[in-house]
Image (cartoon, rainbow, N blue to C red):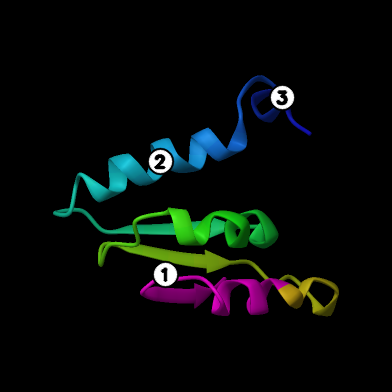
Amino acid sequence: MNVYAKRYNWKLLYFDGFAVMTNTPQDTYQVLNKKANRLFELHEHLDWTENIGMSVSVEDASVIERIDFLRQTNAKTKFLY
């Protein structure tokens, strides 16, 4: 776990980030997430506006389950990286 993650609650970081993205609809955001399970835990509590795209990275077959987590989210735009 990195120093930043130790000092801050990751759930609050998600909510703060989404608040900024939701309040700036003139901008488009593409969020890359390697913690798809964490994203899934919160997805129903986040405001998925049209300007927020969510993605997960899939480096190889060992992390392919990230795709299923992404599929189940309420994100309107989804993509793989």
What's the distance in space between the residues labelled 1 and 3, CA to CA?
A: 27 Å
Q: Is residue 35 left or right of residue 49?
A: right
Measuring from the top left, give residue 38's x and y in whole percent: 65, 54
**Within 10 angstroms of label 3, few (less than 14), some, or many (20 or more) residues?**
few
Q: Amino acid at mark 2?
A: Gly
Q: Secondary structure at mark 1?
A: loop
Quadrant housing the N terminus: top right
Residue drawn 46% across and 65% down? 54
| Residue 67 is inside the magenta segment | yes
Name the amino acid, label 3.
Lys
Q: Which residue extends farthest right?
A: 62
- Closer to the chain start, of discs 2 and 1, is 2
Name the residue at 42% across, 69% down.
75
56 or 44, which lies in front?
Answer: 44
Circle 2 residue: 17
Is 22 included in the stretch rendered in magenta? no
